[in-house]
Amino acid sequence: MLIRIVITNFRSYRQETEFNMLPSSNVRRKDWHVHSRDRGANVLRTAVVYGANGAGKSCLIKALGRLQAMVAAGCLPPTAFRDANKYNDSDMPVTIEVEFGTESDQYSYGVSYCGSLCVEEWLYSTLRKPIYVFERKHDVQTGKTNIKLASNKKDEAKNKLLISLLEDNLLKGNELMLSKHDMVKNSQITDAFQWLTAKLHVIFPETRSTSIFDNRYSDETFKSQSEALISALDIGINELTLKDEDIESFKQNISEWPKLVQGVDGIVKRLSRSPEGTEEVMIDTGAFTVSMRREGNKYFVRRVKALHKVNDNLYDFELKEESDGTQRIFDFVPMVQNVKSEACTYVIDELDRSLHPTLVRALVSRIVTDKHMKGQLIFTTHDAGLLDGKVFRNDEIWFAEKDRDTQSTHLYTLDEFKPRADLDLEKGYLNGRFGAIPFLARFNELNWE
């Protein structure tokens, strides 16, 4: 479960800024919105972030996505230099730190970097008082990396050798130590890595999830529940069909597009270098969308089609033929199922993108009002219709506002205003009572004549 994220010098976040999922002691309603954990901090199940265009909502999600992507890849990307706030000193590092809880522990993991150089990285266990699992710092004078790795007396000699190897050669300046979990063989490092790469799901507006293509849809219960949800949302789809095709047959069917065949051959080479079943690749063309995967020495393509029923006849459509909003719903269907049954965290930027407001409200209410929800949902939106005290607690509603003088984003919650229980939150927000809306004074001064 996500507990907090702290950002410094990332995009519009010039100063150290914290977003957290900790319940406020001022809020006593909807106590079932709080996950009471046996070990570690109790956390909220949901959070929604509002703010004007360009206020920094998306930058918050991008920071979390950047950290996850770096951990998954094992290194800083070539574009990391663009992350730093342009108004701060050029030598000031970007810092992203996240605190989270797993089934067995609670951690604080952070990275500080300048361009493509990792200047500091750390992992602490924070169940009680913070205890370091590892610390890694770049020495500016020597240009070397210094590492501290927690160990017991039994493994002390082995760890000294491992640290020496990592400092001398095995850990490059743009690489992350957390991603070396298979080499370090520390259970806490592996536990933290697994949460960041498998339990945390960050979805951007342009993200096209492969989850609708995966084997969960081969499970009849999961498939029927997903179809029931899609049907309830009234988007005209009655059923989803999955069809697996071997790679040679698929290439034969697309032989009229030589460049696409070449692209498929390139994906086959890429998949051949990945451990079996660890990677699934989307092929997105103007006509259709499919996924490719490897099983042993064989490669398969999976195609999903939506069936529409008209006058008792079923007609199949490629996902690509559906509207942008319908395609976005397909990305969310597994999320609705997962947050109900798994202790996972979904973070979504612009949840309402391409979706009708009534549909967004139905989708969010379906998740938030489920008292058996095991996961977390955090999202940004412009849909003020969701600002409802009957749906969210005051400490679950956040605002992002950019200071007009410093151009720096700061975050705050509705709880800071202590609104009355009967206050119309939507009206209050749109009237500027809580800030985080566009400043339009100059707009009225425009001369259109």
Image (spheres, helix red, strand yellow):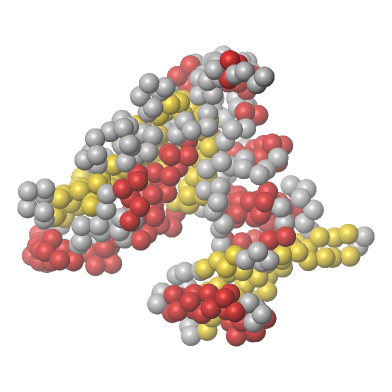
* Above or below for 392 versus 327: above
Residue 149 screen position, x and y as percent: 16, 55
Q: Is residue 226 left or right of residue 56?
A: right
* Above or below for 34 versus 346: above
The image quarter in which residue 61 lies? top left
| Residue sitting nearer the eye, 222 or 198 | 198
* Above or below for 73 versus 115: below
| Residue sitting nearer the eye, 108 or 167 | 167
Q: Residue at the spot x=42%, y=22% of the render?
A: 404
* Above or below for 51 versus 303: above
The image quarter in which residue 390 lies? top right
Q: Residue furthest right?
A: 311
Q: Is residue 188 visible?
A: no
Q: Residue at the spot x=40%, y=23% of the render?
A: 403
Q: Residue at the spot x=57%, y=36% of the render?
A: 381
Q: Is residue 254 visible?
A: yes
Q: Residue at the spot x=62%, y=66% of the render?
A: 285
